[in-house]
Image: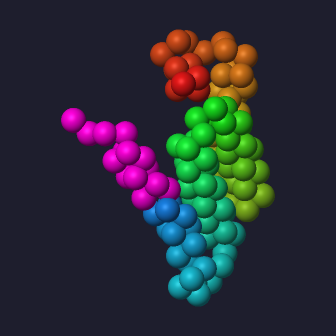
Amino acid sequence: MANVKMFKLLGAALALMLIAWGLSPILRHETLTNDVIATAIILILIGIAYLIIMYNPSWTKAVFFFEGIVISVAGYMLLDFPYNLELVIVGLIIIAIAVLAYLQKLPPNILKWFYR
């Protein structure tokens, strides 16, 4: 049976991998287009958010809300027409889920992920 420390170690490795993946175009001196910048912002912030949620589970709702805002704003401001609307919709769905989690209006099987 796997222990909790091993899962936290694997989770930290995943978060660091996401951050490194987001920074890799910058470190490889690739041409920085709006697509590259938007992807890097989203990957880095998801990695940081995962680390925060993993070590402080009480911040899950706030981090989820913030990630929804970042995804929708970065997608809308940096990407072209069809993709920016898709990320805005995804970001608004994430924001709605976070607000419903704050209000405790989600089904119990989903709400358990926000209140540990």
- For the C terminus, the image quarter is top right
Residue 30 lies left or right of residue 103; in this view the side is left
Q: Quadrant of residue 35?
A: bottom right
Residue in the foreground of this view, choosing between 2 and 17: 2
Q: Is residue 89 visible?
A: no
Vertical order, 111 against 94 (above or below): above
Question: Residue 46: percent from the left, percent from the top?
Answer: 59, 52
Kindly give the residue lying farthest to the left in the view shown: 1
Who's the residue at 40% across and 52% down the image? 9
Residue in the foreground of this view, choosing between 99 and 89: 99
Kindly give the residue lying farthest to the bottom in the view shown: 29
Magenta span: chief secondary structure: helix
Who's the residue at 72% across and 43% down the image? 66
Residue 22 lies left or right of residue 1; in this view the side is right
Vertical order, 2 against 37 (above or below): above
Magenta span includes 25: no
Vertical order, 107 against 80 (above or below): above
Question: Residue 8: percent from the left, percent from the top?
Answer: 42, 47
Who's the residue at 66% across and 62% down the image? 41
- For the N terminus, the image quarter is top left
User: What segment carries the magenta color?
Assistant: 1-15
Question: Residue 84: percent from the left, percent from the top?
Answer: 69, 52
Who's the residue at 57% across and 72% down the image? 23
